[in-house]
Image (spheres, rainbow, N blue to C red):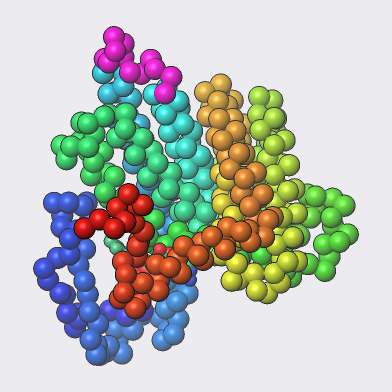
């Protein structure tokens, strides 16, 4: 890490001019830059650690910042829906619009809950929160994209216009899935970090299999212990564990089952691939997605239990209900070898790659039968 002024700023500013985005970007070239010794910050070679710490904070902060974006989008969409009359009634009365607004709020609730949970743990002095920060970043960046996208849908054609704040939010949001660690890389990071702990404990697993909760602790090391603790609804503000509120017992039970299944699947994947699991990106993605949804659901149950309001119970239960479907599907995919899926993917991309790499054909080189032979 160093400070320097001797680098070239290549102008003109790239496509992201302030008129189009809320941030200002340009291409920087570091060309044979000399760094005076007094400008070196910390130790030479120690920059990676500093960068990782900064990224941890940035990733965790994203859940908080994007919660604000989602709040604003939901506000705009709700104001529009409660005023706009179509087919003789306010569109807010129609089932499809209600479902969208409810889903948007439950996604926001989960993002906020994760932000508070990670922040609470940091306030308590927890040093190891990189998995939670990565989970928050992936979840929040995709949640906000979904929420703003649906807000635009609710505001109809007006939402598409550049006068609408939603239009700019939508474009600005795109970078969040790329910077601070691209979401693909973070999914691998989340899964591999979890598996690392599991691999170390593999020998003890046979015994632990008799007790799924103990098993998942072993499988994911400290990361999963925290997941299991969250099921018991820790209160990050009070630093103590509270009971799951009665209306959320069903949701907590579902989550507990998923954590048990999660441990089982992780073990199967490790047994199947061993050290080569690093190359099994599809399986790792399914594992990461299940972990993300389990963490988000746990944060919701924890938060709502502490609040004791019917509205928050509904937000939490609704989130867990939809997350549970995704968790089941992701664990099923992770458990399977995905042989056929991989064959199909390879067939499709190999065709594209060979055409593009040799310059002989476009990436999508498929012609509809009705056009074959036509000039
Ligand atoms: C507006 C803006 C602000 C930024 N701010 C900062 C900043 O403040 N500090 C900073 O350090 N950086 C910053 N960046 C850089 C940003 O973090 C990187 O662009 C980002 O990490 C992705 O790296 P890349 O662009 O090299 O993409 P690549 O690494 O080339 O990735 C391209 C695609 O391939 C995927 N991919 C790459 N490797 C693999 C793999 N092994 N397996 C599967 N998929 C893979 C990626 O997920 C991505 O989808 C900023 C970028 C932008 C656009």
Q: Quadrant of the C terminus?
A: bottom left
**Is 207 rendered above or below residue 83?**
below
Give x and y (percent) for residue 131: 56, 59
Q: Is residue 16 left or right of residue 95?
A: left
Residue 92, magenta (yes or no) = yes
- Ligand 1: image quarter: bottom left
- The residue drawn where x is 25% and y is 55% is 374
Give x and y (percent) for residue 356: 34, 72
Q: Is residue 194 left or right of residue 344?
A: right
Q: Is residue 259 visible?
A: yes
- The residue drawn where x is 40% and y is 41% is 146
Question: Magenta segment, which residues?
Answer: 85-96
Q: Nearer the viewer, residue 51 or 252?
A: 252
Q: Is residue 252 left or right of residue 85?
A: right
Give x and y (percent) for residue 204: 84, 65
Q: Nearer the viewer, residue 48 or 371?
A: 371
Farthest residue, direction left: 12
**Is 113 rendered above or below residue 4?**
above
**Is 36 rendered above or below residue 364?**
below
Q: Nearer the viewer, residue 54 or 161?
A: 161
Residue 83, magenta (yes or no) = no
Q: How many marks?
A: 0
Q: Nearer the viewer, residue 104 or 286?
A: 286
Q: Quadrant of the N terminus?
A: bottom left
């Amino acid at each position: 890490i160093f400070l320097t002024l001797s680098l070239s700023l290549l102008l003109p500013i790239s496509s992201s001019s302030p008129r189009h985005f809320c941030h200002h970007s340009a291409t920087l070239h570091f060309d044979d830059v000399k760094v005076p010794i007094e400008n070196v910050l910390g130790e030479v070679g120690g920059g990676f650690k500093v960068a990782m710490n900064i990224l941890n904070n940035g990733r965790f902060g994203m859940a908080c910042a994007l919660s604000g974006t989602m709040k604003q989008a939901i506000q705009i969409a709700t104001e529009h829906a409660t005023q706009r009359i179509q087919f003789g009634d306010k569109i807010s009365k129609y089932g499809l619009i209600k479902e969208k607004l409810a889903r948007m709020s439950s996604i926001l609730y989960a993002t906020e809950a994760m932000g508070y949970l990670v922040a609470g743990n940091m306030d308590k002095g927890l040093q190891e929160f990189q998995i939670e920060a990565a989970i928050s970043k992936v979840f929040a960046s995709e949640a906000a994209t979904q929420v703003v996208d649906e807000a635009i849908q609710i505001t109809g054609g007006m939402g598409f216009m550049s006068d609408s704040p939603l239009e700019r939010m939508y474009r600005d949001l795109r970078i969040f899935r790329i910077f601070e660690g691209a979401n693909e890389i973070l999914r691998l990071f989340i899964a591999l970090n979890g598996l690392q702990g599991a691999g170390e404990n593999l020998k003890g697993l046979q015994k632990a299999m008799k007790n799924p909760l103990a098993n998942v602790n072993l499988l994911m090391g400290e990361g999963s212990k925290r997941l299991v603790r969250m099921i018991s609804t820790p209160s990050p503000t009070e630093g103590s564990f509270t009971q799951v509120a009665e209306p959320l017992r069903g949701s907590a039970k579902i989550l507990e089952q998923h954590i048990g299944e999660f441990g089982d699947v992780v073990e199967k994947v490790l047994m199947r691939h061993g050290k080569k699991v690093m190359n099994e990106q599809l399986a790792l993605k399914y594992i990461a997605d299940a972990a993300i949804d389990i963490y988000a659901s746990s944060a919701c149950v924890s938060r709502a239990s502490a609040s004791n309001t019917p509205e928050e119970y509904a937000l939490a239960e609704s989130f867990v209900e939809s997350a549970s479907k995704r968790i089941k599907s992701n664990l099923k995919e992770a458990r399977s070898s995905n042989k056929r899926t991989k064959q199909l993917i390879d067939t499709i991309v190999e065709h594209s790659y060979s055409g593009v790499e040799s310059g002989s054909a476009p990436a999508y080189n498929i012609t509809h039968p009705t056009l074959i032979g036509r000039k």
